[in-house]
Image (spheres, rainbow, N blue to C red):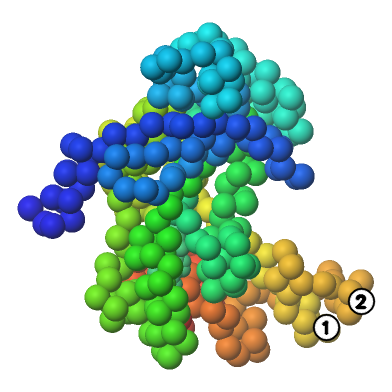
Amino acid sequence: MSPQVIESNNIEKNLKIRCEVRCRIPTADKGEFYVHLYTNNLNNKKHLAIVAGSHIYSRSLNEIRENDTDEKRMIRGATIKPNVKLPLKSIEKDIINNKNGNQFINKIEKNEINQEIPLVRIHSECFTSETIFSSRCDCAEQLERSMRKIQEYGNGVVIYLKQEGRNIGLLNKMMAYNLQDNGYDTVEANIKLNQPVDGRNYTIAARILEDLQIDTVRLLTNNPDKIEQLTSLGVNIVERIPMIPSIFENINKHRNCNHVHYLSSDSTSNCSEDDMNTIIEPEIVSEEHGKLTELEKYLQTKVESMNHDIPLPEYLMHNNTKGI
Ligand SMILES: Nc1nc2c(ncn2[C@@H]2O[C@H](COP(=O)(O)OP(=O)(O)OP(=O)(O)O)[C@@H](O)[C@H]2O)c(=O)[nH]1
């Protein structure tokens, strides 16, 4: 048995988790979430579950504790009546209350969505992207987009794991970035530092899902390793929903004005209306754009060296440029 499998089996055997507190977090443009904070008996990391849908309940938060009182339960965000499980009907109420609810209700009525199967993302922490806006990777965008999708769906959770840098930690990740500035790609840099290419373990995520009484999911991911690990941990994944990076959805070039736009962020104010309406195919962009961005190289490496299932645009597929 490989050391990683042994480690994973040990974690699985010994791990105990508990939801300590749940609170409501409203957002400006992504609706309202219930954030659950989990402790575990193996380390001090505080993993989180960001839940959309007030029908999703944590078993460990709501069970009766020693010297429990109504006030203590209120403060930790537990139900006042212990172990109350709301009827599934409340899912529909959540969806109706949602901004885009009608769309989903229509689909549910047409049986296009089985709203009882939650939409789930297992997301790993990325301080550089999510807190200080690094454009080396697309982690912040993935977090934001998945929260939005799950909220629109009205039934689901983002499990936010404190596994910075694919679990090599921020210190090692910052050293990896220095190597990446000197020609290594994201995989080679980890190896050079004697770190695993991906040192993550999803046992805690599986346990959190279990605690939230979720056993079957539709999973938002491009990462086959997540699917494999979660499946072997007993999570029933009925569907993978791809996370397409917005730069691949939106790369357009205006033929007349010669501007390349990543439409999610660039201003288009210098282009005439005619320019705006004439779009060149993405492969032409790379030739004229010349240098790939760090994000493009990062995504290219994820596909080519980490088997991520991201539909790369043509211009990145047969490129000789070394990935950052
Ligand atoms: N070591 C290292 N980690 C990175 C780098 N860029 C981003 N990361 C980390 O990669 C992880 C991304 O994890 P996830 O959000 O779960 O996404 P994923 O594994 O790419 O898989 P998806 O589910 O397809 O999004 C985070 O922990 C980031 O901190 C890098 O260049 N080097």
Reply above or below: 31 against 293: above
Residue 114 is situated, as x and y percent measured from the top left of the image, at 53, 25
Visible in this render: residue 33?
yes
Image x and y of residue 197, in percent: 30, 68
Query: Could you tell me if residue 105 is visible in this image?
Result: no
Q: Which of 8 and 302 is in front in this view?
A: 8
Give the CA separation, mark 1 to mark 2.
9 Å
Q: In this view, does 59 lie above or below 127?
A: above
Q: Which kind of residue does numbered mark 2 sit on?
A: Ser
Side of 68 relative to 115 (left or right): left
Label 1 with label 2: CB-CB less than 8 Å: yes
Occupied quadrant, residue 164: bottom left
Q: Which residue is drawn at 29% across and 78% down?
A: 193
- Residue 168, image quadrant: bottom left
Query: Quarter-wise, where is residue 307 in the image?
Result: bottom left
Residue sitting at the far front:
67
The location of residue 214, given as percent across then percent down, is 42, 27
Say which amino acid is labelled 1: Asn
Decide if residue 169 is on the left or right side of residue 312.
left
**Could you tell me residue 311's position as x and y percent?**
49, 62
Q: Which of marks 1 and 2 is in front?
A: 2
Image quarter where ligand 1 lies: bottom left
Disc 2 designates what residue?
272
- Is 134 on the left or on the right of 319, as rendered? right
- Image disc number at residue 121: none
The residue carrying pointer 2 sits among few (fewer than 14), some (14 to 19) or many (20 or more) residues within 10 Å by Cα, namely few
Q: Alpha-carbon neighbours of circle 1 within 10 Å: few (<14), some, or many (≥20)?
A: some
Mark 1 falls on what kind of element? loop
Q: Which residue in the protein does label 1 denote? A: 256
Q: Which of 241 and 163 is in front in this view?
A: 163
Residue 302 lies left or right of residue 24; in this view the side is left
